[in-house]
């Protein structure tokens, strides 16, 4: 019997056939993008020689890479070490035993710092700090806070090291002294969805690199410093056999030894070389070839709350749970009050070295219990623990540990305060309608929510109320879209209370997450914190008295599983825990308390995106990806080797890319012919394809009927050709002769699908919104109406994108007989809702609705150059739908949802879709063409209002005596586990998934292309 013939080739040639067969077989990690990169960057490279691969072996080449890495002059390769920790004996007179924890993989900090100055990023280092100011169009000068190197902390440290002592062996050194600001991230993470494989990495970044470069995952700015080992399984056997009190103090001793381990690691990393450099500096040759004396300094340490507790050497859920101040647990809910703010300033946490040393002597020499009365008498009042803090021990007791432990927006707010508030709102809806009808309506509204941008607002595919496997970005999207979703679900006055609270919560989140702050935005955030604290406490008290709220089914199940686990299955008492328990909004948590520290953190270190734990979560992707390439045995060592290979490869590829870019630039200069560039041009307002694949005959549509779109098109083009200001194309003085002077070459206009709108964001980043009639059709334009009470923007829905080649037989048009291409958008206009009042003072979103189709100007044309950017319009679900706004036969106007036969009566403008959008309504965005507050109408309507949100820019106090240093422009491109952070407030075991997937989105966060 003959074997079956081989399958017929399906690809264009034999080479493509072989490549695709290789791609589709074997390991499943070969993505389409990577195969394209293999072909483009390797196989098609002119320097690639197939003969060079004769006898090629990956393992042999890996050994060569590892050998070359060990010969690095900076000695910054990974090394292996062990950490010794002392275990108390529990018996007086018996000295402690030393237990050796193996498996620490580390790189010397001083070697990493020296190597950084020879990296491809070294030319981007800011070695001298400066103050940055902005002068508005009204002449007002304001301090700008964005990067660490333009904050007072960096400036003060730079001034301090100028007075620092010189090393005894170089007393006459005259080298320039500079600060090397270290920003640290660490977080334990699971390496796989199944099994126990995990890694606890420490990452380091240099604060002198712009965060727009530093935060890009593939920038090479992230340095892996160490992988912290865990206590091995043999530890408990050793401790049980040695410590006489292990049986009664096991939990306390384990916690103590884990603290000893992490601080033992940091004591090891802060070796004598680093301590010497910290005190005297170290000489480093910088990228410009000049030797400088570099002083390493720790500025920020970003970690979640459980790790902050370890680093601050305080008790988890103690009397004073905050790592930055000594606020009592009973006062955690007072965030935003003046008394709370004053308390934070007057009672900052300091390290009690003497008390800690006394407690340690009692534990290790006198055999007192780790959590016994003697230790509690010394440390319990401040929630301190008997562990020598590595930073205080090595860098001096004056080292400010509390200031270094910065706020964490991702875990504290998005996965903390907002998640808790959203969960409680679901409880309230269940209490208001026990059959779940209100929750079902909420889920329906979220599923009907339109998307925005490439990944700014994503589709809510599942029931939002169930919160299944939601990442931090998903909770952020829920917050940004929550106001229309919750509107009208509760009766008054509770509906108004909820809408106001949601508005202020979204507003606080937006301002806390700004990448670039001015003094006015920082002051506004400070006022918002006060207002949000007041509203949240009122909401807690109101719902507690008006609604009988109980645990959600998910919370009940999680609580029962925890109780079973803690008591043991044989001892569990199902009868005591089977029912739902009453559950109210808990504000006595560290997460809620932390909101009061954001203003201070921004003033100290710039925008929160610069030190967000999201940066560390993104870095986890690399080690998780590399874990998949190991054989899972001794994975930590294999990951360390692969990290160094990856750094070398990225460095080589970056050097090659820079050479190619330089060559291409020289070639363009040599062959420049004066052609105007399209995409990438910093002055380009928009881009529409020149495709002529979809022509339309203009003659077949021209009628003498004024309602015909062609009539408006002629008016629109005439207005542009005669250089008239855009006013909605209400050109009543145009005659038919004027209109007929517009000639379309070939009698055609051409339809395309996408228009890209380019704009500069508030933080001076070049960004783009893709507008399409079938996907994201809504746009915003500056309103030409300037009277008091007028809204600052007009809104429209794009139903067609066109271009045409035209000329004009009209003497009033200069160069009219010259053919030119003209682009235009056919739009359906929105109008303001009569009698509705919106704005920051009213805490209400702008509300608009379609202009009725019977209106002469319900449809018209728009110059794409007049479009500011795309906007996110959310249906006003509570207002319902109507068939009266547009005839059912006019389906072309419903290209977004062609199956609809009616329209939503109203829409809300989602000003919280991203930070750039917020700043367009608040005003003062530095990157915006008109950065004055667009609130002339609001001030007239609400002139009598006197509240905490009166943010008139003229009332700001700015230090006019500060020097205004110039800022060199940076070359910027487009842009774990779960824990109970409060006092037993988190009963959701699925928090694990939330935090492990917190940053599983693309590297751009949820605010767009290079999200602000």
Image (spheres, rainbow, N blue to C red):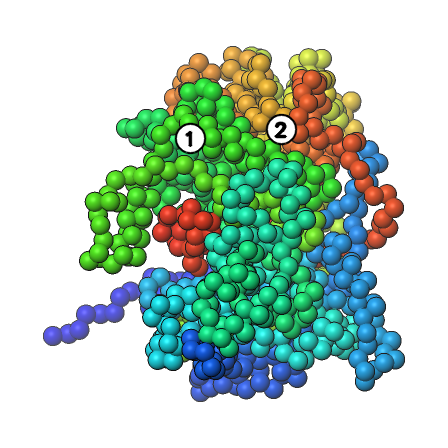
Residue 560, compared with residue 22, is above or below; it is above
In this rendering, position of residue 839 left or right of residue 40: right
Report which quarter residue 828 is drawn in.
top right
Q: Which residue is mark 2?
A: 840
Q: Residues within 10 Å of mark 2 (few under 14, many from 20)?
A: some
Looking at the picture, how far across and down is residue 387, in whole percent? 54, 69
Q: Nearer the viewer, residue 237 or 981?
A: 237
Q: Is residue 520 visible?
A: yes
Q: Nearer the viewer, residue 825 or 460?
A: 460
In this rendering, position of residue 693 left or right of residue 26: right
Q: Nearer the viewer, residue 792 or 203?
A: 203
Residue 975, compared with residue 7, is above or below; it is above
Q: Which residue is mark 1?
A: 544
Kindly state the secondary structure of the residue where label 1 is placed: helix
Name the mark on residue 926.
Answer: none
Looking at the picture, how far across and down is residue 469, in whole percent? 38, 49
Residue 770, compared with residue 218, is above or below; it is above
Kindly state the secondary structure of the residue where label 2 is placed: loop
Looking at the picture, how far across and down is residue 48, in whole percent? 54, 76
Q: Nearer the viewer, residue 251 or 1010?
A: 251
**Number of residue marks:** 2
Between the residue at mark 2 and the residue at mark 1, the CA separation in whole angstroms equals 28 Å
Q: Are marks 2 and 1 in contact (CB under 8 Å)?
A: no
Q: Residues within 10 Å of mark 1 (few under 14, many from 20)?
A: some
Report which quarter residue 492 is drawn in.
top left
Identified at 58% across, 85% down, the residue is 70
Q: Earlier in the sequence, mark 2 or mark 1?
A: 1
Identified at 15% across, 74% down, the residue is 2
């Amino acid at each position: 019997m003959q074997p079956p013939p081989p399958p017929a080739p399906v690809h264009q040639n034999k080479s493509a056939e072989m490549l695709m067969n290789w791609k589709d077989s074997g390991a499943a990690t070969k993505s389409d993008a990577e195969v394209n990169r293999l072909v483009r960057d390797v196989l098609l490279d002119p320097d690639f020689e197939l003969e060079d691969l004769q006898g090629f072996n990956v393992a042999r080449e890996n050994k060569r890479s590892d050998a070359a890495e060990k010969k690095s002059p900076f000695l910054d390769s990974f090394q292996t070490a062990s950490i010794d920790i002392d275990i108390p004996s529990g018996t007086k007179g018996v000295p402690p035993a030393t237990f050796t924890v193996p498996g620490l993989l580390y790189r010397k900090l001083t070697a990493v710092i020296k190597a950084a100055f020879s990296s491809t990023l070294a030319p981007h280092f800011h070695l001298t700090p400066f103050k940055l100011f902005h002068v508005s169009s009204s002449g007002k000068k304001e301090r700008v806070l964005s990067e660490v190197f333009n904050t007072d902390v960096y400036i003060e440290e730079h001034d301090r090291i100028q007075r620092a002592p010189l090393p005894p062996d170089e007393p006459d050194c005259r080298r320039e002294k500079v600060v090397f600001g270290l920003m640290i991230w660490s977080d334990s993470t699971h390496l796989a969805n199944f099994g126990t494989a995990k890694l606890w990495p420490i990452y380091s970044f240099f604060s002198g690199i712009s965060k727009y470069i530093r935060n890009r995952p593939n920038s090479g700015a992230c340095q892996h410093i160490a992988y912290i080992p865990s206590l091995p399984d043999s530890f408990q056997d050793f401790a049980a056999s040695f410590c006489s009190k292990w049986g009664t103090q096991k939990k306390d001793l384990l916690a103590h030894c884990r603290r000893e381990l992490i601080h033992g690691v940091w004591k090891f990393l802060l070796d004598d070389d680093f301590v010497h450099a910290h005190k005297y500096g170290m000489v480093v040759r910088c990228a410009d070839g000049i030797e400088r004396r570099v002083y390493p300094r720790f500025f920020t340490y970003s970690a979640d709350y459980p790790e902050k507790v370890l680093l601050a050497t305080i008790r988890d859920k103690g009397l004073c749970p905050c790592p930055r101040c000594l606020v009592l647990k009973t006062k955690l809910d007072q965030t935003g009050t003046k008394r709370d703010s004053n308390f934070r300033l007057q009672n900052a946490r300091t390290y009690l070295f003497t008390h800690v040393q006394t407690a340690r002597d009692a534990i290790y020499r006198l055999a007192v219990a780790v959590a016994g009365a003697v230790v509690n008498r010394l440390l319990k009042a401040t929630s301190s623990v008997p562990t020598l803090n590595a930073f205080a021990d090595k860098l001096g007791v004056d080292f400010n540990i509390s200031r270094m432990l910065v706020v964490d927006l991702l875990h504290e707010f998005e996965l903390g305060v907002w998640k808790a508030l959203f969960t409680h709102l679901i409880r309230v809806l269940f209490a208001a309608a026990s059959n779940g009808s209100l929750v079902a309506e909420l889920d329906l509204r979220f599923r009907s929510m339109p998307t925005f941008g490439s990944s700014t607002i994503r589709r809510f595919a599942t029931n939002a109320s169930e919160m299944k496997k939601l990442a931090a970005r998903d909770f952020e999207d829920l917050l940004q879209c929550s106001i229309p979703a919750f509107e009208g679900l509760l009766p008054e006055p509770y509906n108004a209370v909820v809408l106001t609270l949601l508005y202020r919560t979204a507003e606080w989140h937006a301002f806390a997450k700004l990448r670039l702050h001015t003094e006015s935005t920082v002051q506004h955030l400070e006022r918002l914190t006060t207002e949000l604290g007041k509203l949240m406490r009122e909401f807690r008290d109101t719902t507690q008295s008006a609604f009988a709220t109980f645990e959600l089914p998910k919370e009940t199940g999680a609580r029962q599983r925890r109780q079973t686990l803690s008591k043991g299955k044989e001892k569990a008492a199902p009868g005591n825990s089977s029912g739902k328990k009453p559950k109210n909004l808990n504000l006595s948590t560290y997460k809620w308390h932390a909101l009061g520290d954001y203003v201070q953190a921004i003033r100290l270190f710039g925008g929160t995106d610069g030190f967000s734990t999201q940066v560390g979560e993104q870095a986890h992707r690399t080690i998780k990806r590399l874990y998949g390439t190991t054989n899972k045995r001794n994975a930590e060592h294999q990951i360390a080797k692969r990290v160094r290979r990856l750094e070398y490869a990225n460095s080589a590829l970056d050097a090659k890319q820079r050479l190619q870019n330089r060559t291409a630039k020289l070639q363009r200069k040599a062959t420049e012919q004066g052609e105007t560039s399209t995409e990438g041009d910093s002055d380009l307002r928009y881009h529409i394809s020149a495709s002529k694949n979809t022509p339309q005959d203009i003659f077949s549509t021209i009628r003498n009927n004024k309602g015909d779109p062609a009539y408006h098109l002629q008016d629109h083009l005439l207005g542009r050709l005669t250089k008239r200001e855009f006013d909605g194309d209400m050109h009543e003085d145009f005659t038919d002769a004027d209109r007929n002077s517009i000639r379309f070459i070939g009698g055609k206009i051409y339809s395309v699908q996408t228009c890209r709108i380019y704009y500069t964001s508030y933080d001076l980043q070049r960004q783009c919104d893709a507008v399409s009639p079938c996907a994201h059709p809504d746009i915003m334009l500056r309103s030409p109406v300037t009277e008091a009470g007028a809204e600052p923007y007009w809104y429209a829905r794009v139903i067609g994108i066109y271009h045409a080649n035209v000329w004009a037989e009209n003497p009033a048009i200069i160069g009219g007989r010259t053919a030119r291409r003209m682009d235009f958008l056919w739009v359906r206009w929105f109008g303001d809702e009569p009698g509705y009042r919106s704005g920051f003072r009213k805490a209400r979103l702008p509300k608009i609705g379609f202009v009725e189709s019977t209106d002469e100007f319900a449809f018209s044309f728009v110059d794409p150059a007049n479009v500011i950017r795309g906007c996110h319009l959310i249906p006003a679900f509570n207002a319902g739908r109507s068939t009266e706004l547009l005839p059912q036969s006019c389906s072309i106007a419903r290209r977004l949802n062609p199956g609809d036969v009616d329209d939503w009566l109203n829409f809300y403008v989602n000003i919280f879709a991203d930070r750039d959008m917020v700043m367009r309504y608040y005003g003062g965005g530095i990157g915006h063409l008109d950065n004055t507050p667009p609130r002339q109408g609001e001030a007239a309507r609400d002139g009598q209002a006197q509240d905490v949100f009166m943010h008139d820019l003229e009332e700001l106090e700015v230090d006019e005596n500060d020097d205004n240093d110039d800022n060199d422009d940076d070359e910027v491109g487009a842009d774990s586990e779960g824990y109970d952070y409060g006092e037993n407030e988190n009963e959701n075991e699925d928090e694990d998934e939330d935090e492990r997937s917190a940053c599983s989105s693309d590297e751009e966060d949820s605010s767009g292309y290079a999200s602000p």
